[in-house]
Image (cartoon, helix red, strand yellow):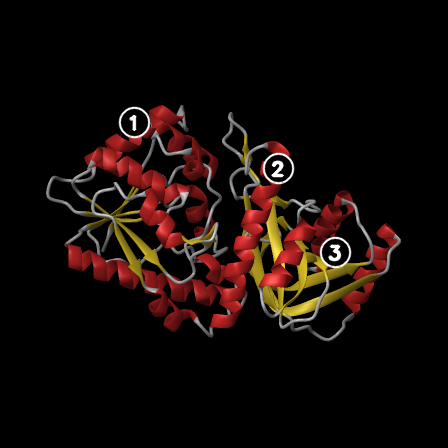
Amino acid sequence: MTQQVIASFSKEFATPQKTVEEMIEFIGENVKPKDKVLIALSGGVDSSTVTSLASRAIPNAIYPIFIDTGYMRIMNGRKEADVIAEVFKDVPNLIVLDESETFYNKTFGIKDGNEKRKAFRSTYDSVLNREAKRLGCNIHMDGTIRPDIVETKKGLKEQSNVGNVLLFEKKIEPLAPLYKHQVRKCAEAVGLPEEIAYRQPFPGPGLSLRTVEEIGREKLEVERKANDIVERGVERFFKETYGKPFLYDELTGERIPFQYFAVTLDNSLQSKNKDEREIERYVKSLTKKDTMAVTLENKSTGVAYKGEEMERIYTPVLALHIDGEVSSLILTHLGKVIPQKFGYSRVIHEIQNGNGKFFVSIQNIKSLNAVTSESIVNLPAYRNIAGEIREKCSGVGAVFQDISSKPPATIEYE
């Protein structure tokens, strides 16, 4: 059985520099001279911070490995694997693997979101175990943070980096006591550049969580292109408006936007029901505009409370078409009230209409620690982004903006 070793600090995040010093000491204390350490490097802030810490603490013992699962992003026109290889080219023993077909064979065709997470995780574990055996690594180190552990223990989702079945003597988690904004401050303290320290979060299973329900090559390619368009469009808007592709609070480390991406859904609707008619009347009473509410066949992950405990639920996505402009205040209100009154956890609002086999939803949120979040609605760039998605992504019909909050929605759709 793998020994799990989780960092603890003398104080609850006293200062970033002090925390970095303690983490370096923690890593050094838990790695012996003959140990070999496999680091799961995704290129996100968490795993990048761990890699930087380990390269200081145990530079001769690390083997960082980046696995291209086939669910990675395009980043400003470049494959993510190429970006990572360039950024970390000076890191000792860096390994970049293309395992796309391995993951496609295990995850294509699965409809249930949680089952996809499980299939992804077991495949990821298998690849890591194979590489660990090949390299002779006996320790695994990754970027697990506090929300990963909390949400998995509460049963809200199957995290790809929590509860792994890995054949190591020991698993070391230096960041496990920290939230995302605290990790960002540590990334700065350890010397990572701003574009890495404040990079938006990207889940381990990647675009598989955003290609909702059953995945095929065509649908995944739509998602990959649409996601790139959303990322570049949001960053372009912030750069033109504020001079930077994102903003952040220097005191708390909060990134604004916290996260933004595209989600690809199937254009498949359920039969009209009485809740939809009541929602239409409710929205019209607020907006004085004609409204159409439809329920998609696709389901999304949500959060429900049983007393003080949370549990994971799956509810169909509700899509709204409202004639004319609607204020951000009203849309935010609808995103909160409709789930309370009608039981949907995910509500999306149409930006641009059209015919096609797929829908795309733009998710753009503000959050401090990913435990709760609120959607950013009516960003002026959305219409241009929607037009570009429909122009460049074959098969896309309508484009929506997500107006949901967490809870009851989750940030990722699956």
Give SS at disc 1: helix
Which mark, residue 21? 1
**Numbered circle sitting on residue 240:** 2
- Quadrant containing the N terminus is bottom left
Callout 2 environment at 10 Å: few (<14), some (14 to 19), or many (20+)?
few
Image coordinates of residue 178 in percent, x first then y, are: 41, 37
Labels 2 and 3 touching (C-beta < 8 A): no
Q: Residue at x 21, y 54 (%)?
A: 168
Residue name at image x 63 percent, y 62 percent:
391
User: Does dot 2 land on a helix, a strand or a loop?
Assistant: helix
* Residue 242 percent location from the top left of the image: 61, 32
Residue 319, quarter of the rendered image: bottom right
What kind of residue is marked 2?
Answer: Glu
In the shown orientation, is residue 378 left or right of residue 8? right
Q: Give the label, 1 or 3, closer to the camera.
A: 1
Res 303 seen here: yes
Query: Could you give the CA–CA distance between mark 2 and mark 1, rounded to whole angstroms?
Result: 38 Å
The mark that comes first in sequence, 2 or 1, is 1
Amino acid bearing label 1: Glu
Which residue does the numbered mark 3 point to in the structure image?
341
Q: CA distance from mark 1 to mark 3?
A: 49 Å
